[in-house]
Amino acid sequence: MMAAIRAVLSAFFGVRGRKGAESDKLKPGQVIVAGVICALVLAMLVLLLVRSLVASQGG
């Protein structure tokens, strides 16, 4: 599962090389689950950042 998360995170940043993509034998289900988890974590981090910035401005 960690290989799937690494693949998704590198895809988020666009830095996955050909050698890394060819060496990993990932199932589509693993990549989908890792992508959903990473997207949810990213959304939650953005939400927390926005809430903390708005709270610090007195809004």
Image: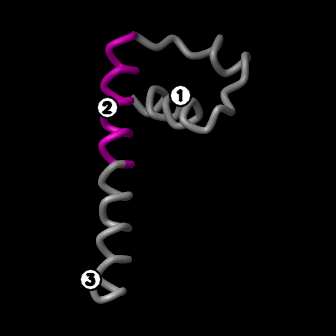
- Label 2 and label 3: CA atoms lie apart by 31 Å
Q: Amino acid at mark 3?
A: Gly
Q: Residue furthest front?
A: 59
Q: Amino acid at mark 1?
A: Ala
Q: For mark 3, what is the residue?
A: 59
Q: How far from the left and from the top, in percent, is residue 2?
A: 44, 33
Counting residues from the start of the chain, the first of labels 1 and 2 encountered is 1
Query: On the picture, is 28 further left or further right than 55?
Result: right
The vertical placement of 40 against 23, above or below, is below
Q: For mark 2, what is the residue?
A: 36
Residues in magenta, as a range: 28-42
Q: Secondary structure at mark 1?
A: helix
- Label 3 and label 1: CA atoms lie apart by 39 Å
Q: Is residue 6 magenta?
A: no
> Residue 7 got which mark?
1
The vertical placement of 59 against 40, above or below, is below
Q: How far from the left and from the top, in percent, is residue 48?
A: 31, 65
| In front of the other: 30 or 45 | 45
Query: On the picture, is 26 further left or further right than 39?
Result: right
Question: For the residues carrying marks 3 and 1, which lies nearer the camera in this image?
Answer: 3
